[in-house]
Image (tube, rainbow, N blue to C red):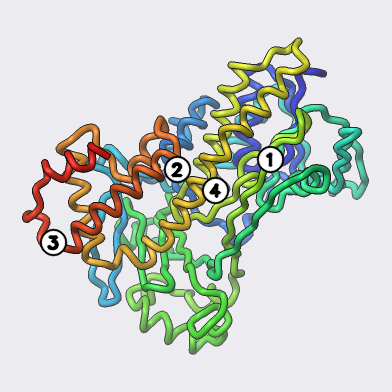
Amino acid sequence: MENKITIIGAGLAGSLLAIILAKKGFEVEVFEKRKDMRTQKVEAGRSINLALSHRGLKGLERAGIGQEILQEAIPMYGRMLHAVNGNLIAVPYGKNKSEFINSISRGGLNIALLNLAEKFENIHINFAHELTEADLDSQTYTFEDKNNQTTKKYHAKKVLAADGAGSLLRNAIKNKIKFEENIDFLLHGYKELHIPAAENNQFQIEKNALHIWPRGQYMLIALPNLDGSFTCTLFFPNHGENSFDTLNTDEKIKDFFEKNFADTMILIPNLVQEFQKNPVGMLGTVRCSPWNFEDKILLLGDAAHAIVPFYGQGMNCAFEDCVFLDDLIDTYYQKNDADSWLKVCEKFNDFRPKEANAIADLALENFYEMRDGTAEPAFLRKRELENILENKYNEYHSKYSLVTFHPEVPYSEAHQRGNFQDNFLLELCRKNENIKDINIEEIYQALKKH
């Protein structure tokens, strides 16, 4: 019994955690409020594609499924920027095509993890079991079994909360101890749209890119799918002159897209219908402290640190949580030592929040860069200059590369170093309209001193 761990949530983080812990020999009991997604139709309008990168891959490799998952992903080597007039500009992510991110279906990845989890005899998943109450003193958890409309009570000594941004367990801790919580919603929401494949599953636009239509106060992005289609997401103000509030008729929707995203009108044949039908999603950041309640509950993933999706790191950060916890268990946990699990929880709370706060800040900053900055000529010159530096000096990595391709660099260090580099180079590129006028060696030495 002492070697048993209960996980609340069988989403991406919960499923990966279950596999990693089962491989360590733990008995793992998982409770998931949804029915088994492998038997359900995915709800339209809520499936923002994921950008799987090196930090997330590291977690999947711990589960032994990294290369298998990549077979179901599409590499994206850079951003493809769509100007209002239809002009295209390709901006690479890394120094060359060896550095890329991967477009992958959230549902497809979750299903792959569930299929793997199902193969372990020491993992038991209870679907359609919604946590409704948590008594932290008695360590008793009440679930509504939606299969037969009954209530069940379950005793658990070690609980990992992977129950998402609206975590009931986070709320239970908040009601029990001194607890800091900040939930900050953007004034923007999002709506999903769909670019179907052309004949014979051909891609209508460049397959190996993350497409962005930057338009100042709003933007449209598109990520490729294996069937030749693209999942598009419009990030748009909730209220105001141009907002989800005001685009409320077929004519207004059509006029707005013709003016701002004209090249998508042919790509998205059911644009108006999809816009009217698909829901508006919220975008917010969750910060809280502490992440543990004694040795009884440990928060991780979105339950501890939900972030906005603009660095493509939400899932990657949650998977990195799993890797960090795995390493702490190796270092501190001993099956017959009653205090060792508490040490694991405390160490996780001591070190991991700093990194989650850093990527939360980076994600918010990248929203403004994607929406506004990518349309600025100086930004494009900066990215060209970064590419030269990365290919000339092995020690130099852009902020994006530090975050995305170098999991050995903590998010907090990538944030600090990357912002300094960004500000330094952007200011330089605003002063010089031709990067050939810039002395690359001098710039590198200046950055190296910092």
Quarter location, residue 402: top left
Toward which corner of the image does residue 426 lie, by quadrant? bottom left
Q: Residue at x 71, y 18 (%)?
A: 340
Hey, what amino acid is under mark 3? Asn
Q: CA distance from mark 3 to mark 2?
A: 35 Å
Report the disc number at residue 106: 4
Residue sitting farthest toward the top? 336
Kindly identify which residue carries mark 3.
Answer: 432
Mark 3 vs mark 1, CA separation in Å? 47 Å
Query: Residue 432, relative to residue 179: is it above or below?
Result: below
Q: Residue 93 at x, y = what percent?
A: 30, 48
Q: Amino acid at mark 1?
A: Pro
Q: Amino acid at mark 2?
A: Leu
Of mark 3 and mark 1, the one earlier in the sequence is 1
Q: SS class of the residue under badge 4?
A: helix
Judge from the rendering whether residue 406 lies leftward or rightward of residue 152; answer left or right: left
Instruction: Judge by depth and name the residue closer to the eye, 268 or 234.
Output: 234
